Amino acid sequence: MEAPPATVMPVTGGTINMMEYLLQGSVLYQSLESLLHRLRGLCDNMEPESSADHELVYQQGNPFMLRARRSQLHPTAPWHLRYQGQLEVGDKSRHALVRNCVDVAAWHSLPEFLNEMGFRMDHEFVAKGQVFRKGAMKVVVSKLLRVLLSVLAPAGQDTVSEDMRSFAEQLKPLVHLEKIDPKRLM
């Protein structure tokens, strides 16, 4: 009998330092059902799992970021804390993006702990969808809901930003709109 692949062997030290291989893309809504049908045919012979993950992204200095994620479907499950390194861009022959990744299970008070350690929450999101598996590969098809508030105005109309802040306050606690540097989201 052969040993299972290294990607599914138990970790005894509590953390594991791995490389993440990553491909991502978007799908038009009218093509979603075709994609899901194709994934059911290509992936392992099991029903896809439902997923609803709440992810908080913390930053302490640039570019050091940590991602705290938990399932909304399984509230008693532990948080997952993940560090993702910078993308390796040197090897053009690779067919996927590659980066160093450290992933650990964490306790229920993880967000408070990160705040106490001096991390600042950069942004958060909820991704709802389905998870398909093919061997060690995991395919997540999810939907993100995003709110964008913008105004086009002539230069020098700085009162517009105050009006936007006032409007955004009225949307709380449903959504917290704030300034986010788009370069940090990449």
Image (cartoon, helix red, strand yellow):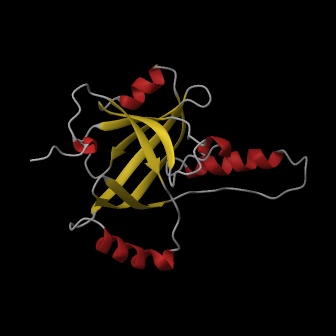
Is 43 located above or below residue 38 in the figure?
A: above
| Front in this rendered view, residue 120 or 16 | 16
- Place of residue 13 in the rendered image (x, y in percent of width and height, measured from the top left): 25, 25
For image coordinates 69% across by 45% down, the residue present is 165
- Place of residue 17 in the rendered image (x, y in percent of width and height, measured from the top left): 37, 31
- Place of residue 113 in the rendered image (x, y in percent of width and height, measured from the top left): 40, 24
Using the rendered image of the protein, determine whether residue 179 is visible from the camera's viewpoint: no
Left or right: where 13 falls relative to 164:
left
Left or right: where 26 falls relative to 4:
right
| Front in this rendered view, residue 135 or 116 | 135
Name the image quarter holding residue 123.
top right
Is 82 located above or below residue 132 in the figure?
A: above
For image coordinates 36% across by 75% down, the residue present is 38
| Front in this rendered view, residue 21 or 141 | 21
Using the rendered image of the protein, determine whether residue 103 is visible from the camera's viewpoint: yes
For image coordinates 37% across by 50% down, the residue present is 53
